[in-house]
Image (spheres, rainbow, N blue to C red):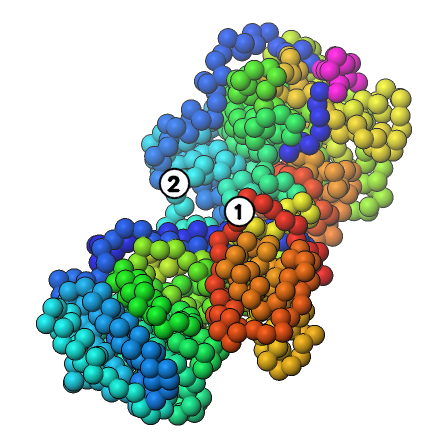
Amino acid sequence: MSDQPQFTVKIDQNKYLPEGGREVHAIVSVESAGGAVASGASAGAQAAEVIIIDTSGSMTYPDTKLRSAIAAAQTAVDTLRDGVMFAVVSGSNSARMVFPQQAMLVPANDRNRTAAKAELKRLTAQGGTAIGSWLRLADQLFDPYQDGVRHAILLTDGKNQHESPEELDAVLFRCAGRFVCDCRGVGTDWEVAELRKVANALLGTVDIVADPADLVADFRAMTEAAMGKAVADVALRVWTPQTARLKFVKQVMPNVADLSAMRAEAAPQAGDYPLGAWGAESRDYQICVEVPPGEVGKELRAAWVKLVVPGAPGQEAQVLATGNVLAQWTDDEALSTKINARVAHYTGQSELADVIQEGLAARRDGDLDTATARLGRAVKLADEAGNEAVTAALRKVVDVLDPVTGTVRLKANVEKADEMSLDTTSTKTVRTRKDETVRTRRSEV
Amino acid sequence: MNGNENGDMDGEGNDTAVEANETAANGSATGEGPGGTRPGAGQANAGDAAARMEPTGMDATGMNPAGMNAAGMEQSAVKPAELACPQCGVVVYPGEAFCENCGRQLIAGRPGNGAPRPSGRTRCVGCGEAAVDGEGYCEHCGMKQPADRDHLEVELATPGGPVAGVSDRGKRYARNEDAFAIAPHNTGVAAVVCDGVGSSPRPETASRAAADTAATEIATAMGAGAAPGDAVRMAVRKAATAVAGLAESPEAAPSCTFVAAVTGPDGVTVGWVGDSRAYWLSETDTSPAADLADTGELNSSAVTADLRGDPNATSPDAETLPLGPSRRLTDDDSWAAFMVASGALTEAEAEAHPNAHVITAWLGADAGEVRPHVRSFVPDRPGTLLVCSDGLWNYFPGAGDLAAVLRNAQADPAADPTGAARILVRHALDAGGRDNITVAVLPMAATPSTEQAR
Ligand SMILES: [Zn+2]
Ligand SMILES: [Zn+2]
């Protein structure tokens, strides 16, 4: 593991709390640099890739969906580095091996790539959609490769109609932490919330590829990113004081994803939150701890954050980097009313994701007042954060009368793809525009 | 921290204070380079010492006068007893900061200066679990353990019984600019408390240098047979030189107050510059009324004694005062004290004035010639000597107030001086803790007998 990238953890917060203050917020920035990527047989940890293509009947309406999916999967196969273990799976009511024929992974090489692409070309579409069964097969394929970077791409065009939500939930519970899965919806007949649930559970991304022609570039990008991962299974280990309560742990950059429910108890007073595989990249997390109020002047370590590679059962975790989240009570209002700019920024973007999803749900339900209010708030927050992608997506759904106050009017006719695009974009965040600015905390009760 | 501007009184301060401060004795140590007596020098020598003091722990330096135990009977009664290192037993000299043989720290009150903490988990001052990690946080409750100077407790065994000092950052200031040092000498103990002047640069370096230098000097001089009053005057001179040596320029002069108390068979000698104080708390004060009569006083006999002091005295102090009921032993070098003493304002009027706590004398390169007040007392009953910064006495100005705090908490300073010091600090914190708080507690078990000692 000597080729591992160098990890750093940085904490941004205002540690000062007013008398009686209880809630401590901090942004944990994790960055990795350098290190050799996991490769084929030569390295200790192997990379494994499974490509899952929806072949339900709807993929042929229009036929371009299936043909684009095949082309995209072929590109992904071409992007695999030599030696990476891979397989291609097709999914309908159940999952089926496309390449190889046996349920196993094979190393990427010229012969296997050519054979896989030939098998992909022969794919036809029929039947329904049972995403859980597809993931179950992927999990089985990854099973012998748990030490390496494990990544799946899942492409679908429809709702998960041929198994119950409970069945899907059970599979997600089983697969969580076993591999990372990026999910893509093609067309507009799939459900953003459903696919987001899959992606969040498997620490991946979700996106819409409205135009099948864009699939090739998207698959190449996803595969390239997967090939850039050097360390699998990094976790954020968060220790909190005996008397404190960890309210949430969220990823806030590059997208908002609540990790709170994924806690695995790791040590006394400490839990592990899975962060998936890492290449050279940086991500930000927000944590919130509720501590018992202390007397003025007292300082507390409200959370001790360690970036770890958890060991096998009975083994010590490998600690990559650490950081302290502090709390210190003061009666100096000039100190306690400052709000850390990055905490404010990401708090705003979490709220942005929430209000967009609530606004779109209200719009679908015909509650136009709520929809207008929520999406108006979203316009204001996106403007404040400088999140131009979200602002652009919002402007396809609402007419903006005043971005500063968030005064909007719902558009009468909205393309389904634009609505879904806004939904998938809602969780994508941008870094702080003006990190140095300090805003005053709204007065605490 | 002494939070008040000291510049306001320029031109009248030292010269016109109510009492004629003693003139510095002849042969003042003006030629001495500041580095020679700075605390850093001594510490550097013993820098590799394994046994630095654990700042928050009870460290009984516990020096025993070796001569009294073993060969004591054969030794002349006037020959000073030898001190032995409590760790390795070799003879050490009064005033030495560290044992030459084993590196053990001998003068108490100095924080560890970043020296590694002893291995083994320290107990958390918050929850009591033995779970403090290397970064100083409790792995149970998360509490940051006090930094070296944030909260410092020292207890020292002396021939006359245990003495203790506690210093706390308080609630308002980011750092503790008070410093104290306790040094045993052959026949008693010396305690020095200094309070960095907040309006000066790096005041915490001034108080540290002054306390360490003075405690070392007093113990050394006492070991050499000096009279306590001379030892204190010498110590103030050396401390003043050390503090002046910290200044980059007269305009940027770290400065601090000073108060020292020396116990011995002759009684108690106190010396001070500024508004840090010493108090006598009689063990036999029973009713609060008895205390009240004595609070906030400017004791006329003490003033007289002070005025009579021979400016060039090198012999034992000409006059000592009897020490009976609880009382304050020092009179502040402050605007308020000056206004009251000169009859311009009543005590209440002076205390209410914004200038009340502006000090009129201090140690520092901008202080000019420093002339300490020195007084000696002979207690006629058992009691406790308190040496403290204004972080304590701001809340409990009268000797009766302080005695009441200890009495109400059922403190027993003679048996547990650290406990008594903690109670006083705790009460100042509970009262607001607006300043750094430092107090040294020196119980005087029995009435010293002058006849015996001479
Ligand atoms: Zn020794
Ligand atoms: Zn604790």
Q: Secondary structure at mark 2?
A: loop
* Chain identity of mark 2: B
**Left or right: residue B71 compared with residue A339:** left
Q: Three-letter amino acid code at disc 2?
A: Ala
| Residue A292 in view of the camera | no
Most foreground residue, B258 or A386: A386
Q: Three-letter amino acid code at disc 1?
A: Asp
User: Percent x, y for residue A394?
Assistant: 56, 65
Over which residues does the magenta segment extend? B8-21
> In the picture, residue A42 is in which quadrant?
bottom left
Tell me the CA gap for discs 2 and 1: 46 Å
Q: How dense is the environment of label 2, judged by Cα within 10 Å: few (below 14), some, or many (20 and up)? A: some
**Left or right: residue B428 compared with residue A179:** right
Q: Which residue is mark 2?
A: B51
**Left or right: residue B136 compared with residue B261:** left
Q: Is B161 placed above or below A327 here?
A: above
- Magenta stretch: residue B20 in it? yes
Q: Is B285 placed above or below A94 here?
A: above
- Magenta stretch: residue B203 in it? no
User: Percent x, y for residue A266?
Assistant: 38, 70
Please determine if labels 2 and 1 lie on a single subunit. Answer: no
Most foreground residue, A107 or A295: A107
Give me the residue at 54% from left, 46% from top: A434
Q: Which of the labelled discs sits on residue A435, or is there none? A: 1
